[in-house]
Each structure stands twice: as C-alpha cells, then as structure tokens.
Amino acid sequence: KAGVTQTPRYLIKTRGQQVTLSCSPISGHRSVSWYQQTPGQGLQFLFEYFSETQRNKGNFPGRFSGRQFSNSRSEMNVSTLELGDSALYLCASSLGTGVSYEQYFGPGTRLTVT
Amino acid sequence: KNEVEQSPQNLTAQEGEFITINCSYSVGISALHWLQQHPGGGIVSLFMLSSGKKKHGRLIATINIQEKHSSLHITASHPRDSAVYICAVYPNFGNEKLTFGTGTRLTIIP
C-alpha cells in the first residue's frame, strides 16, 4: 500500500503570495490532519478533515484554510504569506477520527517564504 | 509553560547504551503518542499509549497516568536510532487535538 504523499516537497514563495499544498492519504483512510513544524514553535496542529468536513481546528489565523475532497485527498491553503509561515507542513492520515486511530505521516512540504 | 515537556532536549550516547527519554504533561489526557522524526522530516508513529507499557523490538514505552509521565526506552542503542523523538498527547477536553512536546534529539555514536 502506498504511503501518504505530499506535493510539492519544496516550495519557495514571496511575502504576500498564496500557496496551496496537497496531501493524498493512504488508500481507505478518511481522515486527514495537517500540522505545522517550525524551529521556534515545534509541531502544531492546524486542522483535521473527515469525510469532507472540517472536524477540528488549531489556533491559527484565518489565512490558513483547508478542504477535503470526496476521494479523501486534502489541500491546505495559506493566503497573504508572511515570513513566519516558513515551515515544514506535514499531513497525516488515519482510518477514522479520534484517539483510537493511528496516524500515518507524509514526508512533508518545506515552505520557504522570502 | 508548555503542556507537554520533554527531557532531555539533547542526548548523545555510545552505541549499545540504554536510553531513556522522558515526557511530562500537565493536562488530563486520552492517549499519548511517541513519534520518531529522522533528518529530512519524515515522522513515524512508534507507540500510542493510554495505560501501562508497550514493547516493540528494542523500544519500550511506559506511561503513569496518575503522575502524568511517560518514558521511552531504547535498549542496545544503535546509530540508526539517531533521530528526534517527540511526545504528543490528546488532551481529554473532548476536542482531540494532538499537543506536541518540543522533542528530544538523540545521537548515537558508533
């Protein structure tokens, strides 16, 4: 079974631009969670989608948004990029939602904002 | 103060040594994860615990719910164990959002 894939793997953007990152979960997984990892703040939860519905959201500004499609693939969008948005963005998929389900992480997308 | 604290932040040991990484948390939790992150960013889930002890190969994870503390042990450490180990908890507020520790960077010297 293929693992979680994320595209692109690396991205360089300029302040003020917007960016869309993509995550394809493991086949059969219906839940996708997104995380941001920075040297200063570590790993932080962004949001979780299950069956095309946002189930949970972390403490991030409205510039961060996401969606999930009927095939469980998910995208996250960051508008009006700031230098502080430079980070590794990780997605994780699981069969279901909640603490009982193991999460499988993708390799991440490294975003650099200049 | 972070809800999840790990110690030590950095650990260097010789191959073969017994390794212990600690995680303390300040909130009630539903479950605790131990994650491993290798250079390049990929994260692997090692254990999910809600009580007691789990073992997988040379890795052992324990949790004491009353003391709000978990430990990850590595026996017969090997250079390939070099990675960042991250503790993460599901607070039992009902919102089920993973909250992460800052990680422990482990380096095993041959």
Image: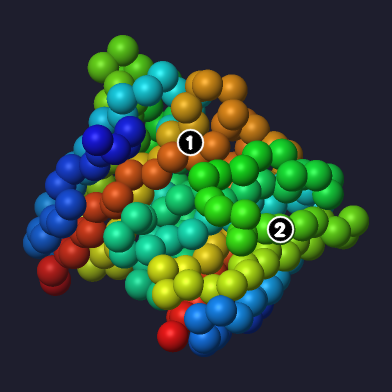
Q: How many marks?
A: 2
Chain holding disc 2: A
Find residue B36 and report its horizontal and vertical position in percent.
Answer: 39, 55
Residue position marked by numbered label 2 in the rendering: A66
Residue A77 located left or right of residue A59? right
Residue B70 located left or right of residue A3? left
Asked if A12 appears above or below A87 in the picture, the reply is below
Density class for disc 2 (Cα within 10 Å; few <14, some 14-19, many ≥20) is many
* Coloring applied to the structure: rainbow
Residue position marked by numbered label 1 in the rendering: B48
Q: Residue at x 23, y 59 (%)?
A: B105
Asked if A46 appears above or below B93 in the picture, the reply is below
Q: Looking at the image, do the residues carrying marks 1 and 2 touch, with CB atoms under 8 Å apart?
A: no
Residue B12 located left or right of residue B32? left
Chain holding disc 1: B
Q: Which mark is residue B2?
A: none
**Mark 1 belongs to which amino acid?**
Met
Q: Residue at x 59, y 22 (%)?
A: B94
Density class for disc 1 (Cα within 10 Å; few <14, some 14-19, many ≥20) is many
Question: Quadrant of the image for the N terminus of chain B?
Answer: top left
Asked if B2 appears above or below B15 in the picture, the reply is above
Q: Residue at x 35, y 72 (%)?
A: B39
Find residue A114 and report its horizontal and vertical position in percent.
Answer: 44, 85
Q: Nearer the viewer, residue B74 or B36?
A: B36
Q: Nearer the viewer, residue B92 or B49?
A: B92
Select label 1 or label 2 by which is in front.
Answer: 2
- Residue B86 visible in the picture: yes
